[in-house]
C-alpha cells in the first residue's frame, strides 16, 4: 500500500424535520437539456441525503429522510422525494411518501424515469412512478437496513444491507429478492458502485474491518463475493472512475482510498491538509460523498469541515471550497452528471447545490 498526502487548503446535530413551502413549477421539457453555467442552490423540505440524476428526462431527484439515520431513524415517518431541474437546479415538486413508508435514504433512477429508493427504518425497497404519482414498496429482511443501491446493466437492483450484513438483489419485474451474506461478519456494508465492466463493488464500514468487496452480478441474484484490503479504517461511500479504478471515502480518517483491481494494490490520499494533520486523532473531518468526473478528478464532501472539493490523482493535489455555513453538513449526497456538473446536498442547511463545470478551479 502506498500513501500520498494531498496538497491543500464534533459531529453536528440534525435539526428536527420541518416542512418548507415551495411553489410547484414544472419546466418545459425543452429547457431540461440545456444547463445553466452559474452555480445555484435550492431548498429541500426535509433533511436531504442521496441524489439520483435522470439525464434522459432532465431531472435531479433528492431522497429526503428528514432524520440522521444511524442506520435507522429513531421513529418511522414518511419522507419526501424531491424533484429538481437538471437544467438549473431549480425546485419543481415534492413527492411526499404515503402513510406506511419511511425516510427514503439513497435513490436510483430506472430507464422509465421511476425512482427506486431504500428505506432502512422500515426495512423496505420503494418505487415511485413520478408521472402517475404511484408508489410501491417491498419488504426485505427485518433489521437488515437497506442502504445504498444501484441498477446493473440488466436493470436489476443491488443494494447494501447495513444492519443485515448482506448484499441484496431485487428484480424490478419479477420482484424476486435474494440476500447474500458477506463473508466477514458484522461488516456494515455501506456504499455500492459499478465499474465500467459491470462488476459491483461495496464498502465494509465497520471499524476494524478495513475492507471493500466485489462480485459479478448475475440474472438470478446468486453471487460469489470477494473481499479486498481497503487500506483505510472505515471505507464509507464508493465510486469507480472510467479506467475501472475504485475510489472510496474514509470518513473520520480524512482520507480517500484507491484500489486498482488489476494489481490488487491501494493508494491512500490524505485530503484534509492542515485541517487534520494527524488522521489518528482527528475530530473535525468526515470524508463522506465521493464521485469521479469525466476529467478523472475525484470529488468528495467533508461533512464536519463543511468542504466540497476534488482530488487530482496524478499530482495528489486537492481543490476545495468551504461552504458558507460551517454547520451545513455536506454529507452522502454527491453526484456528477454527464455535463460534469457537480451536485451535492447540505444535510443541515436543507439545500441542493448545483456547481456547473468550472465552478471550482
Image (cartoon, rainbow, N blue to C red):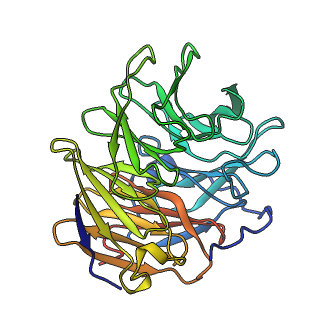
* Between 102 and 94, the one nearer to me in the picture: 102
Q: Is residue 285 above or below residue 186?
A: below
Q: In the visual, does 217 lie left or right of 244?
A: right
Observer able to see residue 270: yes
Q: Residue 187's spot in the image, x, y percent? A: 51, 42
- Give the quarter of the figure containing the N terminus: bottom left
Q: In the visual, does 94 lie left or right of 180?
A: right
- Give the quarter of the figure containing the C terminus: bottom left
Q: Identify the residue at image location x=74%, y=37%.
A: 122
Q: Identify the residue at image location x=72%, y=67%.
A: 14
Q: Is residue 106 above or below residue 185?
A: below
Q: Residue 43's spot in the image, x, y percent? A: 65, 66
* Between 320 and 263, the one nearer to me in the picture: 263
Q: In which quarter of the image is residue 125?
A: top right
Q: In which quarter of the image is residue 261?
A: top left
Observer able to see residue 38: no
Amino acid at each position: 500500500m502506498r500513501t500520498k498526502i494531498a496538497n491543500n487548503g464534533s459531529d453536528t446535530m440534525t435539526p428536527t424535520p420541518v416542512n418548507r413551502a415551495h411553489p410547484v413549477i414544472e419546466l418545459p421539457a425543452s429547457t431540461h437539456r440545456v444547463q445553466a453555467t452559474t452555480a445555484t442552490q435550492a431548498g429541500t423540505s426535509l433533511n436531504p441525503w442521496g441524489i439520483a440524476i435522470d439525464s434522459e428526462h432532465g431531472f435531479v431527484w433528492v431522497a429526503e429522510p428528514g432524520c440522521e439515520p444511524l442506520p435507522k431513524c429513531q421513529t418511522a415517518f414518511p419522507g419526501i422525494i424531491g424533484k429538481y431541474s437538471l437544467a438549473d437546479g431549480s425546485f419543481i415538486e415534492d413527492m411526499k411518501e404515503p402513510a406506511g413508508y419511511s425516510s427514503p435514504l439513497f435513490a436510483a433512477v430506472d430507464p422509465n424515469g421511476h425512482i427506486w429508493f431504500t428505506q432502512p427504518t422500515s426495512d423496505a425497497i420503494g418505487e415511485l412512478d413520478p408521472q402517475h404519482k404511484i408508489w410501491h414498496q417491498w419488504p426485505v429482511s427485518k433489521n437488515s437496513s437497506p442502504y445504498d443501491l444501484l441498477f446493473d446493466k440488466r436493470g436489476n437492483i443491488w443494494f447494501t444491507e447495513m444492519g443485515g450484513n448482506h448484499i441484496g438483489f431485487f428484480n424490478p419485474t419479477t420482484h424476486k429478492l435474494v440476500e447474500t451474506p458477506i463473508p466477514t461478519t458484522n461488516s456494515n456494508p455501506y456504499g455500492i458502485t459499478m465499474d465500467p465492466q459491470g462488476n459491483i463493488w461495496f464498502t465494509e464500514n465497520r471499524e476494524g474491518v478495513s475492507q471493500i468487496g466485489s462480485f459479478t452480478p448475475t440474472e438470478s441474484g446468486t453471487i460469489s463475493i470477494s473481499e479486498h484490503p481497503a487500506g483505510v479504517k472505515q471505507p464509507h461511500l464508493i465510486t469507480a472512475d472510467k479506467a475501472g479504478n475504485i475510489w472510496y471515502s474514509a470518513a473520520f480518517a480524512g482520507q480517500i482510498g484507491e484500489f486498482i483491481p488489476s494489481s490488487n494494490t491501494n493508494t491512500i490520499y490524505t485530503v484534509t491538509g492542515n485541517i487534520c494533520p494527524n488522521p489518528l486523532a482527528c475530530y473535525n473531518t468526515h470524508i463522506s460523498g465521493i464521485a469521479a468526473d469525466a476529467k478523472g478528478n475525484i470529488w468528495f464532501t467533508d461533512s464536519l469541515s463543511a468542504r466540497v472539493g476534488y482530488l487530482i490523482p496524478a499530482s495528489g493535489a486537492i481543490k476545495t471550497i468551504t461552504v458558507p455555513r460551517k454547520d451545513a453538513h455536506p454529507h452522502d449526497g454527491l453526484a456528477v452528471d454527464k455535463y460534469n456538473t457537480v451536485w451535492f446536498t447540505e444535510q443541515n442547511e436543507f439545500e441542493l447545490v448545483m456547481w456547473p463545470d468550472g465552478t471550482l478551479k
